[in-house]
Image: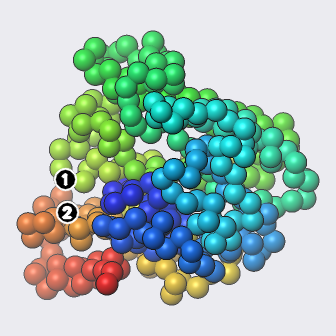
Amino acid sequence: YSPRNSCATGNNELSGMIGLYSIYNKCTANTYSSNLYPNSIFNLFNNKGYKTTSMHNYTERYYARREIHTNMGSKRYFDVDDLGLTYNTKDEEWSSDEDFLKQVVKILNSYSKNDKFMTWLTTVTSHQPYGSSTYGDKYLYLFDGEEYDDYNIKLKRYMSKLKVLDDGLGVLLEGLEKQDKLDDTVIILYGDHYPYGLANNILETALPYSIEERYENERVPFVIWSNDIEATTYTEYTSYVNLLPTVANLFNLDYDSRFSTGQDLFSNQYESITIFADGSWKNEYAFYNASNDNITYYTNKTYTIEEIIEINEKVNNKIICI
């Protein structure tokens, strides 16, 4: 899950990079853009001799990424202008993720075979709005099935934009393979938030599960891919806050877990739970709704009042901010 809060894009990106929850009602990333983050994902890789970069195919209009990422330890930040990409701010027409990843491949090609690299890429094409646009209309013809009713033009435009991202991932994979770097590269994908420009009843028509329950629309993809990993499905509950400790474990980085509220997904001590901005939480057994102090069970397992209080205390200790 990627629980949505204020400034969801910037805040959830920040949480993924530092393993801490943001202040849900504040644009935390921008508010603390001048802070230094010695335990960020960039610095953990810097300490292991990796070349770190970060790239985004848009401007600083919403988030001060050049300052934020630099203070996190990214050795070079590239925005849409640095990458030489086109965009249209007047109509909120985002740039192409396919063109973006073509430029990424060129930059990676400048690295030597022996360079270890870590780069954080923030794509943008699939973001709202879902009115008529270059990429929203480009692949409409592919989405004429029964699940895409004629009235549901916004969903079709969203899917068209996702096709641009999908094509971009193909460019990235092919580029790494041509450079003989694919077998030594791990690609991690996650959604920073669900497409909140689509109403739930529209979004649900494209999903294989119901999102009628509160916060179920905040389920997003999370993929760890490498050529030598056998495909398996991870079923425990998690969110972006666990990204940093999990990556630190997988790459054997020097990481002190006391500086994070996240956990390594593959640890024997991992607690399967997703925490939402208002203090609600969900796991395999139950959903606790903090707004009405109500709990819904999914299995025969139930919690005592004391156990619920204990979980709530742990949750609030993770997300509380003064």
Q: Secondary structure at mark 1?
A: loop
The quadrant holding residue 86 is top right
The residue lying at 30 percent from left, 80 percent from top is: 320
The residue lying at 47 percent from left, 33 percent from top is: 90
The residue lying at 51 percent from left, 25 percent from top is: 135
Image position of 56 (left or right of 27): right
As displayed, is residue 148 above or below residue 113? above
Q: Which amino acid does the dot numbered 2 rest on?
A: Phe
Q: Return the x and y of residue 229 as percentages of the image width and height.
A: 64, 52
Of marks 2 and 1, which one's residue comes earlier in the chain? 1
Q: Identify residue for label 2.
A: 287
Give the CA distance from mark 2 to mark 1: 9 Å
Q: Secondary structure at mark 2?
A: strand
Q: Please identify the quadrant where the C terminus is shown.
A: bottom left
Image position of 212 (left or right of 67): left
Q: Please identify the quadrant where the N terminus is shown.
A: bottom left
The quadrant holding residue 179 is top right
As displayed, is residue 134 above or below residue 297? above
Tell me if residue 90 can be seen: yes
State the scheme by which the image is colored.
rainbow
Tell me if residue 263 can be seen: no
The residue lying at 72 percent from left, 46 percent from top is: 82
Q: Return the x and y of residue 40 as percentages of the image width and height.
A: 60, 73
Q: Nearer the viewer, mark 2 or mark 1?
A: 1
Q: Identify residue for label 1.
A: 214
Q: Return the x and y of residue 137 as percentages of the image width and height.
A: 46, 18
Residue that extends furthest to the front in the rendered view of this protein: 90
As displayed, is residue 86 above or below residue 44? above
Do callouts 2 and 1 mark residues in contact (Cβ within 8 Å)?
yes
Front residue of 3 and 185: 3
Q: Which amino acid does the dot numbered 1 rest on?
A: Arg
The quadrant holding residue 106 is top right
